Every structure is written in C-alpha cells, then in structure tokens.
Image (tube, helix red, strand yellow):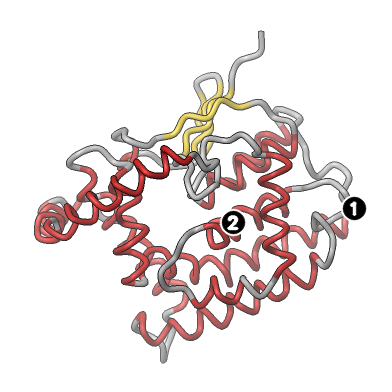
C-alpha cells in the first residue's frame, strides 16, 4: 500500500476548504492533478504558532511552500496538472505567478491583516477562535506584524516609507493585476484550455478568499465584484472540485461560529494589553 501524503494547513470557512491562500493553492492543485492527500487542519493546536503551513508530510520528509510542494507532486509523485501545457504556456504560467506575488499579495496582506476594520472584525476573531489559549492572544498579532513588515519591506521604497503612504500604490497595482487576470481568462473556465493547471491553482488561492470573505471594508473586494468572470472562476472551481469540503456552509455550524466570533471579539477587546505585554516579553515570537 502506498504511503499516505498528509497536508497540514489552516482549516476552512466562508465556503472555502481553507481560508489561507497558500493552503488553498496546494489543495486546489491536488484536486486538479488527482493527488490523494489526507488534510489535517492545524486549527486549535499549538502548530497555529509553531507550524509552517502548508506543510506536506510524506514518509518522514516534510515539504513546505506551495511551489516546493507542487514541484514534489509533479516530479516525485507524478501528479502533474501541467502536462498538456506548451512551452509558451509554461512560461506564461511562471510570469503570472510572479505577477500575483508582486502585485496582488501585498494588497491582500493589507486587506486582511493591516486594515484596522477588517482585522478587528474578521481576521483577528477568526484566527483567535482557531488557536488554543493562550495562543489566541498571540497568533493574530504575530501574523499582522509579519504582514506589515512584508509590505513595507517589498513596497516601502523611497519616498514611500509608512504604510499609509504605501496603501495607494499597492491597491492600484492589485487592481491592475486583477484586470490583467480577468482579461486573460476571458469567458473560459480555466486559463489554459479545458482543464485546470497550476496557474489556476495559484489564482484560485489568491482570489477566492477575497471573493468569499465578508469584509467590512475592502476597496479591492469592491473592484473584484466588477469582474464577473473571476468570480465565476472561483465559484466553478469550488463547485466542480470542492462540492463537499469542510468549509461548505452548514446552517447550524454558522450560528455556532457567529456566536463564537462575537464572544471572541469581546475577549479580544480586553486582551490588547495582554497581547502587547506577551509579545514584548517574548522576542522569539516575532519575525
């Protein structure tokens, strides 16, 4: 019997198999390529702080980062969703993935982790409610600090030094990126031909959370609402490949989650001081 491949990742919600971009990329590619993996959410475990997700475990070896995991599935396990691509399409795939990383990722990090309203009402309560005590006080803040540092490191060149100065630039570039993706996709279900490939997995991973999350404040989500084909692209992949995933809406569970989120928000309002004290006293927890 072949050894089982285990994927450790953040769990699902909002109608998605995972709310985490990198985890979504790997989950989608596994579906597209026919790879059989056992999904183990890290929710409510200590790995919410110490784990690097997504993380593929196979025969004692651990592979992290979507690009490395996809490469392992293609070359070592012969699960290749790109086998029908031409050399030109392969080159285009690499170019579009680089575009996503450079132009769209900073705006997504800002939308979910830096925008104060989104962070307070959606991102922080969600990740806090999926982390065990006392990590629920640490995990959201750590991710937020990492996101802010990454944005300023990649986009904060002179004369733009503060996050307020950088905001306009990153959102303008992200909207341009979404427009390019929309133009390239056109009326097709997938970016190249009639079957999905690694580019579809990456675009899905980046765009689906923006499409499905109930964000209180997001000019980028408002822009996506104008691009019907990208929204249909995400919905089609969910319906065709993830019709019965754990993130599918369940009325009873939604009520429980809503109540849990309200409770978490109340707790979080009282925990700002605790979070700051713990972070300052634990320099090993910062990145």
How many numbered circles does the render carry? 2
Occupied quadrant, residue 45: top left
**Location of residue 3 with respect to 151 vertically, above or below:** above
Of 1 and 43, nearer the camera is: 43
Tag on residue 66?
Answer: none
Of 273 and 170, nearer the camera is: 273
Q: Earlier in the sequence, mark 2 or mark 1?
A: 1
Q: Which residue is mark 2?
A: 208
Residue drawn at x 51%, y 44% as measured from the top left: 18
Residue 199 on image: x %, y %: 72, 54
Left or right: where does residue 158 sit relative to residue 267? right
Quadrant where the C terminus lies? bottom left
Mark 2 touches mark 1? (CB < 8 Å): no
Residue 120 on image: x %, y %: 29, 64
Instruction: Look at the numbered disc 2 and give the secondary structure of its residue.
Output: helix
Q: Which residue is mark 1?
A: 86
């Amino acid at each position: 019997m072949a050894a089982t491949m285990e994927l450790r990742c953040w769990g699902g919600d909002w109608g998605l198999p995972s709310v985490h971009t990198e985890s979504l990329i790997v989950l989608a590619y596994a579906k597209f390529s026919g790879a059989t993996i056992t999904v183990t959410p890290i929710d409510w475990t200590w790995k919410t702080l110490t784990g690097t997700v997504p993380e593929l475990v196979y025969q004692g070896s651990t592979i992290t980062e979507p690009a490395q995991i996809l490469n392992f599935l293609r070359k070592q396990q012969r699960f290749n969703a790109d086998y029908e691509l031409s050399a030109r399409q392969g080159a285009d795939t690499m170019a579009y993935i680089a575009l996503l990383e450079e132009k769209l990722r900073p705006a997504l990090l800002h939308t979910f982790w830096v925008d104060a309203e989104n962070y307070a009402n959606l991102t922080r309560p969600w990740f806090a409610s999926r982390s065990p005590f006392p990590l629920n006080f640490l995990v959201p803040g750590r991710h937020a600090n990492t996101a802010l540092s990454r944005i300023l490191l990649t986009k904060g060149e002179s004369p733009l030094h503060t996050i307020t100065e950088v905001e306009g630039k990153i959102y303008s570039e992200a909207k341009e990126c979404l427009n390019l993706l929309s133009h390239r996709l056109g009326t097709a279900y997938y970016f190249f031909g009639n079957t999905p490939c690694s580019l579809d997995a990456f675009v899905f991973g980046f765009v689906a959370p923006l499409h499905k999350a109930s964000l209180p404040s997001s000019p980028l989500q408002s822009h996506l609402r104008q691009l019907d084909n990208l929204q249909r692209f995400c919905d089609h992949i969910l319906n065709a490949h993830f019709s019965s995933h754990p993130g599918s809406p369940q009325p009873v569970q939604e009520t429980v989650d809503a109540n849990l989120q309200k409770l978490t928000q109340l707790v979080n309002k009282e925990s700002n001081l605790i979070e700051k004290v713990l972070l300052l006293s634990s320099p090993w927890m910062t990145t």
